[in-house]
Amino acid sequence: MSVVIEIQLPVNALTQHQTSLSVLIERAASGDTQAFEQIMILTQQRVMAMTWRMLGNDADARDAAQEVYLRVYKHLGRFRQDQDLFAWLYRITVNVCRDFSRKRQNHGKRFLPMGGSAEVEALSLAVDEIGAEEVLLQAQRRQLITRAMATLPHKERMSLILRDLEGLPTDEVARIMKSSPATVRSQISSARKKIRIYCEKYLKERSGKNSHEL
Amino acid sequence: MNCKRLQELLPLYVGRELEDEQLQKITTHVQSCEACLESANAHREVRQLIHEFEPPAFSDSFYAGLRKQVLGELETRVQSPTVPPLAGFLWPCVRWSLAAALLVAICGLAFYFSVNRGVEKQLVGTSPTANRTTDETASNSDLSRLKGSGDEKGRKNTPPKRKRVSGAELGAGKSIERSQLRKEAESLERPAKMVAGEFPVNADTSVAGTEDLPTKTLRVEILTKDQNIRIIWFSSPPNNPDSLSDSHKGI
């Protein structure tokens, strides 16, 4: 005897979501701040993740995210309904982060990877849930990749983040970066090679230190 | 495909950013080459590591604070939407627009003046030298010599239009008033925008007009401010046409 279970998927869920989003954009463009807040709620995690990955610390990421939303509100009238909202958001975020990086370079600072308070909280929660050793290992890997990303040039880092972490196709990354797909592929390839070299070097140094201590 | 070339493509191979044909070739090579397989695995690990580059989990209060800050900033901007005029002037787009407009205006003026100067030259260049009669050129040369200095300047600076004393008048033996001659002399002194040599006095044409020359000797006296100095100009009889130019030496 076989039991057939029918699951009804929301067929038009995506379309409905897009429709509601376009309505929100229209309302926000006419000056409705509540609608704009709804847009922020829908997009804030992705924007914060992008700014944090590009700038490397909580304070700058927050400031950049704030600037992104201010620019979004300012230029909302220019947004066409046939455009992808997230692609548009990414473009603005990339521009804002580039400006922030330039300002930071002018002040003699570079990519500043450092764990914020939220990270400490997340780590302490994770220690309770899973083994301390596992958490430590994760933290080490995360620290390693954060440092490796900090060594990358700005454009390579942006291309890599958009392609590998945001999962955008190369053509879309090229559009956002105002570049060609071939250039983006070259940047991504170079970034992956550099990260590999950095990690290998770091792990060798670590293993060398450990053997010396033993 | 050799190993060196494959090493170059491996970062893109693990991300599947190559064309199907290349992917197939690399897969075939990696399956048969142990060193390349190891390298490909290392790249896969790196790719997994990159995926661990995650931001910390920000709390709801953090996001609420961000939204509050943004909306607060927007309200402030709505309440005071006007930008100070000086700040507006300093906007890069405004600055660039003004600079571009200024540049266009300067270029336009420069073009206008250069074109106008060209037209003026052209007009002067096409002045009635071509239509001038032989009598006229002869009389012009005479008048320029009447000025008394005998310099080339007066001849070269002869204006295109002036009251002329033709050879016919000279032939009739009419007396030319002193004031008229003075006017002529003054008009010769007027600065004119002419290139030197634009109105050359043709020696041949001045001789050609001798058919109507007077039978009597023409005598012209010019009084100067100094009563002791008089300039007397006279022409020789037309027996010898070549002697026309020599007659001017009587000054």
Image (spheres, rainbow, N blue to C red):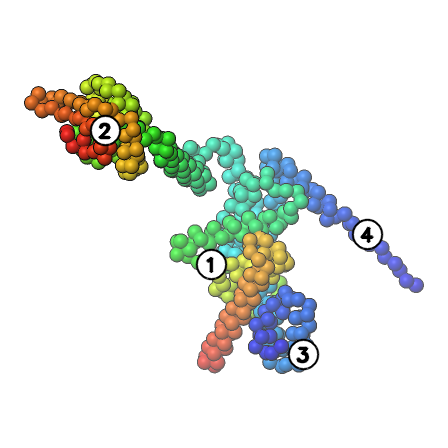
Q: Which residue is mark 2?
A: B238
Q: On what subunit does the disc labeled 1 rest?
A: A
Which labelled disc corresponds to residue A8?
4
Q: Residues within 10 Å of mark 2 (few under 14, many from 20)?
A: some
Q: CA distance from mark 2 to mark 3?
A: 120 Å
Q: Which residue is mark 3?
A: B31
Of residue A128 and residue A70, the one placed in the foreground of this image is A70
Q: CA distance from mark 4 to mark 3?
A: 43 Å
Q: Which residue is outermost to the left?
A: B228
Disc 3 marks a residue whose amino acid type is Gln
Q: CA distance from mark 3 to mark 1?
A: 39 Å
Q: Are marks 4 and 1 on the same chain?
A: yes
Of residue A213 and residue B23, the one placed in the foreground of this image is B23
Identify the image quadrant of the N terminus of chain B.
bottom right
Taking B144 as reference, is B42 left or right? right
Closer mark to the observer between disc 2 and disc 1? 2
Q: CA distance from mark 2 to mark 1?
A: 105 Å
Disc 4 marks a residue whose amino acid type is Gln
Closer mark to the observer between disc 2 and disc 3? 2
**Relative vertical location of residue A37 with respect to residue A60 in this rendering, above or below:** above
Of residue A82 and residue A208, the one placed in the foreground of this image is A82
